[in-house]
Image (spheres, rainbow, N blue to C red):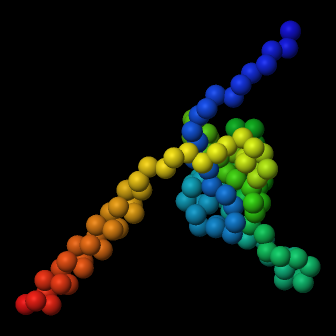
Amino acid sequence: MINKYIKKPIEVEALQIHGNVSEIKEFIGEHGDAHINDYAWKAGLGQPCTVVTIHTLEGDMKAIDGDYIIKGVKGEFYPCRKDIFEETYELAESEPNDDIEAMLEHLWNDTADEESEDKV
C-alpha cells in the first residue's frame, strides 16, 4: 500500500550561491570546493559562473549560481535548485547575531574611548 507523508519541519542552514566563493568555502569546509568558471567569458561566449562541488553521502554533486547549499541535520551538505528550495523552505526567524553584537559593542567602546581622550 502506498502511504502519504508530510516532511517534518526541521530548521536547516543554507547559503545561496552567487559568486560568493570565499563564503561558500567557509560554509562547506572540507565537504567540497568552489570556484569561478570564466572560460566562456574569456572566449567571449558567456558570463562567469560560480561552480561548487559538494561531497555528499551519495557522491560528488555540482551546484551553480542561484542554487542553494543546505547543511542537513547531521552536518551533511547537499545542493538544491533554487525553485525546489523556495517551494520547500522559508526563512526562519533569525536570532541576534553574536558577531554583529560584538562588533557594535567594540565600536561603541572605541567611540567612548575617543571621546574621553578628546576631553583630556
* Residue 116 position within the rendered picture, expressed as x and y whole percent measured from the top left: 13, 83
Nearer-the-camera pick, 31 or 96: 96
Residue at the limit of the structure toward the top, as seen here: 1
Name which residue lies at 75% across and 63% down.
Answer: 65
Name which residue lies at 42% across and 56% down.
Answer: 97
Q: Is residue 72 positioned above or below 47 on the image?
A: above
Report the label total.
0
- When asked about the image quadrant of residue 46, the answer is bottom right
Nearer-the-camera pick, 33 or 117: 117
Name the side, left or right, on which 52 lies relative to 90.
right
In the rendered image, is residue 35 in sight?
no
Name the side, left or right, on which 106 lies relative to 88.
left
Name which residue lies at 69% across and 69% down.
Answer: 19
Nearer-the-camera pick, 21 or 120: 120
Residue at the limit of the structure toward the right, as seen here: 45
Nearer-the-camera pick, 104 or 38: 104
Quadrant holding the C terminus: bottom left
* Residue 94 position within the rendered picture, expressed as x and y whole percent measured from the top left: 49, 50
Q: Is residue 63 positioned above or below 107 on the image?
A: above
Residue at the limit of the structure toward the left, as seen here: 120
- When asked about the image quadrant of residue 36, the answer is bottom right
Name the side, left or right, on which 54 lies relative to 9.
right
* Residue 34 position within the rendered picture, expressed as x and y whole percent measured from the top left: 68, 62
- When asked about the image quadrant of residue 75, the answer is top right
Name which residue lies at 92% across and 79% down.
Answer: 45
Quadrant holding the N terminus: top right
* Residue 28 position within the rendered picture, expressed as x and y whole percent measured from the top left: 60, 53
In the rendered image, is residue 109 in sight?
yes
